[in-house]
Image: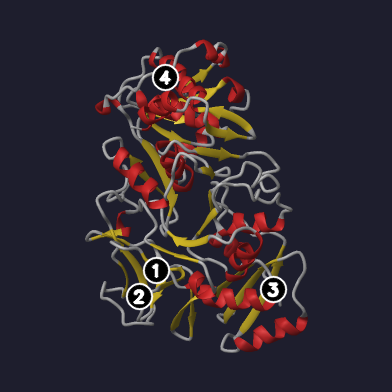
Amino acid sequence: MIIDHIYQWAHIQPNRNAIIANNAVITYAEFAKGIEITRKFLECQQLPRGATIGLLMQNLLDCWIVCIASRAIGLNTVAVRNISEAQQLRVHKLWCFVDTEAEASNLVMPKDVDATIITVPKTIYGNIQQHGLPTPLETESLYGGHILYTSGTTGANKKLLWGARDEDRRISARANFHGYKNRTIFHNLNYPLWTGAGFKRPLSVWMSGGCVVFDQTDDIFLNFFRHKITNSLLLPSILSQLLAATCERRSEKSSEPITLDVGGSVLKRHQIMRALDQLSSNIIAEYSATELLTPPLMSTVHNEDDIEWLLPLDGRDVSVVTDEHVLTAPNVEGFLRVRLNDLDFTSYYDEVEGQSALVDGYFYPGDMAVKRADGRIRILGRVDAVLNVQGRKMAVQPIEQSIQGYFGVDEVCVFGHINDAGQEELIVAIESPTPPSEAKLDSVRKRFSTFDSVRFHVLNEFPRSNTGTGKIRRIVLKNLLTKNVPEG
């Protein structure tokens, strides 16, 4: 279990960095001692083994310490931003919430909720240097799990239980897949523990004896290369912010080149090519999902073709099928599916809403795709984000990518809509501080003359999720633009 690996590394390399949190360095010895002190404190609270508790800490270092300590005494954990969110998640039999003294003053208790709150006092860490190094617990049957949650095509949060039984195999498989070593310095940005991005990779880095960087400061992108990182995972929205910032460049004295994994269902060519030129020569484009242990599609970026057309990984059965689950012919659009293996999630925790994504041993992530004759696959966008042009369904991602490149802006979303007059119209949303020229707008209108009208909306910012991933909330954006839409 991860706590045992951390404790083992604390004995092997006590002074090596385990975490750099908001530029503060925590060694493996300090990390292990902090977890053990917290474990003993929570053990005294006499919480029933097998109970589920909510972690109310926004500080990632605190949240990780409490999460690992809680699981070590047989508790299941779920990280939430607030109590109201826990109610929306519908985690059954949530026993109590745990916060820290530093964050307790910010806690807002809903009027209709009577919840037990356990606050971890900062005084228990007062003499941490005087504590001896803890030894591994090595009692696998004792450990609890952790609940991840992710939104899918249903629009509801789907919950996944990261259980203790397969944890070592899962963590080890991910560490080997990504090549993490004890010299790895992985920048995990500010991804929270309820996300797959925020939970899975730190575990694999710590199992390998490496260091994880968390940054929740306002200078996250200015300081991105400050700690000579070797790896990071960047979602498209985060890559855009990093490219826009004036970044401190990686020191040439670093022992190994930085590897930037860029993940997301829709990757943008101009962003990744800029990153290849400005940030790192070693960029990997990947496609994955919280339900999957490792990315099923990825490619090392050498040219634009590597960004759009990803390679299925060895041992992964990735295909494109019709709505009747029949394989499509090469270059024919269809639905993406991935054969699940024994370390992927094969069911959802206490939830029936997401079960339609799991069919006969396959995971359907809700994306349209197309497969070339050479086996490479291109993601075309979400199943529920298609245009219906005179009865023909078209994936929006290639259209959005084309318009975005033509306008020279970072984000474009297109929506089909039937207006109050019963007309078929195309809505083009543009995220930019300034609108494109009227000539370019007219050019796009002519391209889509099959629609009764084409409307343009320029917004400084699109509505995005606040779950740490910064995904565009397409449904919210469309609803915003289809109410009292001005002529364009």
Considering every residue shown, the one lying at the far left of the view is: 360
* Residue that label 2 marks: 375
Which numbered disc, 1 or 2, marks the residue that appears first in the sequence? 1
Q: Which residue is mark 1?
A: 311
Q: Which residue carries the number 4 mark?
A: 39
**Of the pair 480 and 234, the residue shown nearer to us:** 234
Task: Name the foreground residue: 391 vs 17.
Answer: 17
| Residue 136 coordinates in the image, percent (x, y) | 34, 23
The residue carrying pointer 4 sits among few (fewer than 14), some (14 to 19) or many (20 or more) residues within 10 Å by Cα, namely many
At x 41%, y 19%, the residue is 39
> How far apart are labels 1 and 2 at the CA level?
7 Å
User: Is any atom of residue 26 visible in this view?
Assistant: yes
Amino acid type of the residue that numbered disc 1 sits on in the rendered structure: Leu
Q: Amino acid at mark 4?
A: Arg
- Do the residues bearing badges 2 and 4 touch, measured as CB atoms within 8 Å? no
Q: Which residue is mark 3?
A: 408
Mark 3–mark 4 distance (CA, rounded to whole Å): 52 Å
Is 375 situated above or below 263?
below
What is the spatial separation of the Cα atoms under label 3 and label 2, in whole angstroms? 31 Å
* Sequence-first disc among 3 and 4: 4
Q: Nearer the viewer, mark 3 or mark 2?
A: 2
Other residues around mark 1 within 10 Å, as few (<14) / some (14–19) / many (≥20):
many
| Disc with the residue nearer the chain's start (2 vs 4) | 4
Residue 476's place in the image compared with 372, above or below, is above
Q: CA distance from mark 1 to mark 3?
A: 28 Å
**Residue type beneath disc 2:** Gly
Mark 3 touches mark 2? (CB < 8 Å) = no
Q: Residue at x 45, y 37 (%)?
A: 87
